Image (spheres, helix red, strand yellow):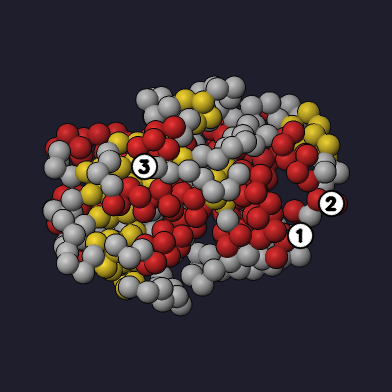
C-alpha cells in the first residue's frame, strides 16, 4: 500500500552493522519515499529521505504504534549482543523488545514485517552439505544469542497465525562483515582493548584449526540488498543468505599465509571460557559451542524468489573486514564508531 510519494519504511536498529547498510540502500532507492530510522542513540548522519527517532525497545512505554502507523514495511534489525554475562538484560531487549515490535506492527496495520533472524536460529546441522529453510530452528539452547533468535521464530509462527494479512519475511543471514563494522565487532566479540593490528598476516604464523569450526560469511551490503528486495516484493517466509566459499582454517590460512594447526575443541573452549570468566573476552564459550554446531546454509530460495545474488565472495568479505580491523574501520553512528587500538 505505497503512497503516491513512494514506499514508507521504518527500520529498527538503524545505526548498527546491518541497519546502516539497509538505511543507505533504502535512502538511495527511487521507489522509497521516506525512511524512519529508530535507534537508542541518534546518529550524526543524514542520508536522503531519512528521519531519525530515539527509541529503546527494552522500555515498555516505547510508543511504537504511532511511529509505525502509515508505514508500508517495518524492517526489524534491533539487537543487543552484550552483556553476555547478563542474559536477562539481552532477553529484555532482544525478545521482549521484538515482541513489542510485532505487536505494534499488527496494531498499526503495517502490511509487511521483515525480521532479522539468523543462521544462529538453526538447530545443529551438517558442515559438509547445505540445508534449506526447512531445517529446524530450535537454536543451541546454551547460547543466549541462539536461544533468543530461536524463540522469536516461534513468536513469529504465532504472529503469522493470528495476523495472516501481514506479510512476514524472516532473513537468516550468515555472519555479516564490512569495513565499517570492524571496530564495533572487535568490541563486541574481542573486547575494546584487543589490538586491531593483530589481524596483520605477518603476526599470524599459524591458525588454530578446531574441529567443526566451519561457517559462512556475507558482506553486510549484500544482506541489505536482500532486505530491500523483500520490502518491495510480494514474498513471505524465510530466506537463507550466505556467500561462498565456506570459511574454515584452511581457507583462512591460504588467505593470510598462515599454517593451520589442529587444536582440540576442549582446549579451545577452555581458553575461551577462562577469558570470558575473567571478563577479558566478551564472546562466551556458549556461543563458541553453538558456532561449532551451526549448519551450512543453501541460499537457493533467495536466488530464485528474490532475484538476489551476493556480489562479493566470502574471501573478499573477510579481506575487507581484516583491513577494517587494522585501520580502525567505522561509521558515523555510535555503535559503529571507529577506533584503532594498538
Instruction: Identify the residue under disc 3.
Output: 306
Instruction: Identify the residue under disc 1.
Output: 197
Question: For residue 185, what is the image quadrant?
Answer: bottom right
Disc 3 crowd rating (10 Å Cα; few below 14, some 14-19, many 20+) is many
Q: CA distance from mark 2 to mark 3?
A: 42 Å
Q: In the rendered structure, which disc, 2 or 3, sits on the residue that comes first in sequence?
A: 2
Instruction: Identify the residue under disc 2.
Output: 203
Disc 2 crowd rating (10 Å Cα; few below 14, some 14-19, many 20+) is few
Q: Position of residue 273 (x, y in %)?
A: 64, 39
Q: Position of residue 263 (x, y in %)?
A: 76, 30
Q: In the rendered structure, which disc, 1 or 2, sits on the residue that comes first in sequence?
A: 1
**253 or 314, nearer to the observer:** 314
Say if mark 2 contacts mark 3, CB within 8 Å. Answer: no
Q: In the rendered structure, which disc, 3 or 1, sits on the residue that comes first in sequence?
A: 1
Say if mark 1 contacts mark 2, CB within 8 Å. Answer: yes
**127 or 147, nearer to the observer:** 127
Quarter of the rendering occupied by the N terminus: bottom left
Amino acid at each position: 500500500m505505497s503512497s503516491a510519494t513512494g514506499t514508507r519504511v521504518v527500520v529498527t536498529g538503524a545505526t548498527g552493522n546491518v541497519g546502516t547498510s539497509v538505511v543507505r540502500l533504502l535512502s538511495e532507492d527511487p521507489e522509497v519515499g521516506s525512511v524512519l530510522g529508530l535507534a537508542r542513540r541518534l546518529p550524526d548522519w543524514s542520508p536522503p529521505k531519512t528521519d531519525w527517532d530515539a527509541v529503546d525497545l527494552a522500555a515498555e512505554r516505547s510508543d511504537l504504534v504511532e511511529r509505525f502507523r502509515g508505514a508500508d514495511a517495518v524492517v526489524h534489525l534491533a539487537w543487543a549482543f552484550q552483556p553476555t554475562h547478563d542474559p536477562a538484560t539481552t532477553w529484555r531487549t532482544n525478545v521482549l523488545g521484538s515482541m513489542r515490535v510485532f505487536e505494534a506492527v499488527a496494531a498499526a496495520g503495517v502490511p509487511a514485517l521483515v525480521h532479522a533472524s539468523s543462521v544462529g536460529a538453526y538447530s545443529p546441522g551438517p558442515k559438509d552439505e547445505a540445508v534449506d529453510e526447512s531445517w529446524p530452528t530450535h537454536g543451541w539452547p546454551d547460547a543466549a544469542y541462539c536461544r533468543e533468535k530461536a524463540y522469536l521464530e516461534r513468536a513469529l509462527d504465532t504472529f503469522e497465525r493470528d495476523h495472516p494479512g501481514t506479510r512476514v519475511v524472516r532473513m537468516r543471514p550468515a555472519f555479516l562483515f564490512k569495513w565499517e563494522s570492524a571496530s564495533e565487532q572487535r568490541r563486541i566479540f574481542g573486547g575494546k582493548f584487543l589490538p586491531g593490528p593483530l589481524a596483520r598476516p605477518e603476526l599470524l604464523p599459524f591458525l588454530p584449526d578446531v574441529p567443526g569450526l566451519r561457517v559462512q560469511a556475507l558482506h553486510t551490503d549484500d544482506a541489505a540488498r536482500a532486505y530491500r528486495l523483500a520490502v518491495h516484493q510480494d514474498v513471505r517466509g524465510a530466506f537463507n543468505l550466505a556467500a561462498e566459499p565456506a570459511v574454515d582454517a584452511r581457507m583462512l590460512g591460504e588467505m593470510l599465509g598462515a599454517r593451520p594447526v589442529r587444536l582440540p575443541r576442549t582446549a579451545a573452549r577452555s581458553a575461551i571460557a577462562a577469558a570470558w570468566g575473567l571478563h577479558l573476552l566478551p564472546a562466551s564459550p556458549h556461543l563458541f559451542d553453538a558456532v561449532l554446531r551451526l549448519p551450512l546454509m543453501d541460499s537457493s530460495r533467495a536466488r530464485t524468489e528474490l532475484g538476489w545474488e551476493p556480489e562479493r565472495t566470502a574471501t573478499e568479505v573477510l579481506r575487507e573486514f581484516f583491513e577494517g580491523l587494522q585501520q580502525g574501520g567505522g561509521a558515523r553512528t555510535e555503535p559503529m564508531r571507529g577506533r584503532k587500538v594498538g
